[in-house]
Image (tube, grey):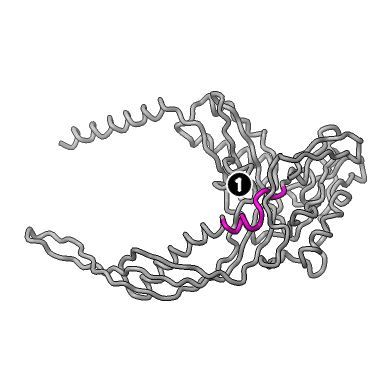
């Protein structure tokens, strides 16, 4: 499927998502627990339609991509009139899904414009809001240095389901490298003890590696929300983009563009390649250690996917500071930073010192 075909498909988003229950007329939303469309009022549920024949999550050619620029979050606003009750709500221009605050109707706007790329895949929620709250509560209880009052301020029921934008990149890499291979040997000293001496030799070569699904969060808004810590996401569970899956959730369009995302990805790829080259040198030259790795990389056959991943996000305030948390909507893994009590840390250090002193006198 081409980028143009994906974009065209998104234009039917609004009429496809705001479905009404045939029994009671309430809005039907996606239920992570069952993986079906569900009515919270009368219990009606129905399966999502099967993907069209031949439809799959496609890798797109990077060099042929258009609309690669980053978008600024919150600079533009848009007015959306609810087609159910007529109320007008204001959204950030990058939001593509929301819930009408007046009647609860789901509203999924077109996921692409003439200036942006449309998503090709989505990872549906499988962790419910209740489960996310339970995972968060258990995670917070294990934070021994977090003040009790801060734990009381945290509300596990305040999580909001959000589909966040991610880029994934594939690329073939060819790397010309030089490095030092080290060989250890034990040398006996005059006092009878042994020390390790390393003999070094310079080596060079070409190392190739295919990079598969290097992910980059394409949102500037959630850089400190704990989203990075709650990964990774199960990309094997990707399905072709279906706006029905977004019904009842908030969804964001990317604010970090395709090319800027690639520059971020390359930083992580370079770190991965450095480690791989060190392992290659150890194996190929039977070295004990490796140092002074230097390499240049040629990237070829670069492809990308623009996808949406599920995250439960919440925050609370403690002593005028906001703490943000995220729960992976697929795995339940929690990410974020909890408040730390300096007094509890000092007490723990003093107790530790007391135990060490007691053991010292006990063993004398």
Residue 178 in the figure: left or right of residue 98: left
Q: Quadrant of residue 304?
A: bottom right
Q: Is residue 284 magenta?
A: no
Farthest residue toward the left? 190
| Residue 325 coordinates in the image, percent (x, y) | 59, 38
* Residue on which the image places disc 1: 332
Residue 259 lies in magenta, yes or no?
Answer: yes
Left or right: 157 with respect to 291? right
Residue at the image point whose x is 20% and y is 62% from the top: 196
How far across and down, in percent of the image, does residue 229 sit?
A: 54, 46
Q: Name the quadrant of the N terminus.
A: bottom right
Q: Nearer the viewer, residue 326 or 253?
A: 253
* Position of residue 345 measured from the top left corner of the image (x, y, whole percent): 39, 30
Q: Is residue 333 left or right of residue 282?
A: right
Task: State the quadrant of the C terminus.
Answer: top left
Identify the residue shown where x is 78% and y is 45%: 97
User: Relative to 198, is 315 above or below?
Assistant: above
Q: Closest to the observer: 141 or 299?
A: 299
Front in this rendered view, residue 317 or 29: 317
Q: How many marks?
A: 1
* Label 1 element class: loop
Position in image of residue 184 (x %, y %): 24, 67
The residue located at (83%, 42%) in the rendering is: 106
Callout 1: 10 Å neighbours few (<14), some, many (20+)? many
Q: Which residues are magenta?
A: 253-263
């Amino acid at each position: 499927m081409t980028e143009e075909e994906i974009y065209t498909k998104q234009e039917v988003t609004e009429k496809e998502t705001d479905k009404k229950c045939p029994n009671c007329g309430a809005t039907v939303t996606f239920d992570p627990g069952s993986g079906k469309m569900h009515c919270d009022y009368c219990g009606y549920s129905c399966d999502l339609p099967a993907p069209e024949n031949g439809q799959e999550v496609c890798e797109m050619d990077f060099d042929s991509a258009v609309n690669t620029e980053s978008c600024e979050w919150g600079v533009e606003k848009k007015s959306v009139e609810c087609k159910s009750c007529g109320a007008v709500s204001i959204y950030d221009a990058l939001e593509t899904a929301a819930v009408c605050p007046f009647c609860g109707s789901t509203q999924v706007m077109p996921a692409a414009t003439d200036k942006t790329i449309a998503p090709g895949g989505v990872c549906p929620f499988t962790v419910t809001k209740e489960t996310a709250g339970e995972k968060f509560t258990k995670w917070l209880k294990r934070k021994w240095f977090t003040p009790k009052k801060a734990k009381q301020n945290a509300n596990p029921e305040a999580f909001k389901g959000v589909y966040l934008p991610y880029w994934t990149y594939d690329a073939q890499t060819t790397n010309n490298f030089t490095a030092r291979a080290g060989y250890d040997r034990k040398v006996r000293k005059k006092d009878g003890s042994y020390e390790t001496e390393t003999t070094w030799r310079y080596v060079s070569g070409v190392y190739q590696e295919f990079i598969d699904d290097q992910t980059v969060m394409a949102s500037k808004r959630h850089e400190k929300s704990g989203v990075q810590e709650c990964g990774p996401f199960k990309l094997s569970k990707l399905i072709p983009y279906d706006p029905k899956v977004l019904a009842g959730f908030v969804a964001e369009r990317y604010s970090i563009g395709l090319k800027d995302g690639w520059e971020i990805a390359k930083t992580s790829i370079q770190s991965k390649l450095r480690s791989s080259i060190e392992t290659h040198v150890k194996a190929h030259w039977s070295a004990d250690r490796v140092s002074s790795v230097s390499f240049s990389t040629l990237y070829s056959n670069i492809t990308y996917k623009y996808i949406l991943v599920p995250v439960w996000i919440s925050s609370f305030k403690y002593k005028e500071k906001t703490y943000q948390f995220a729960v992976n909507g697929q795995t339940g893994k929690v990410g974020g930073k909890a408040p730390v009590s300096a007094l509890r840390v000092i007490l723990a250090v003093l107790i530790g010192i007391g135990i060490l002193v007691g053991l010292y006198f006990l063993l004398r």
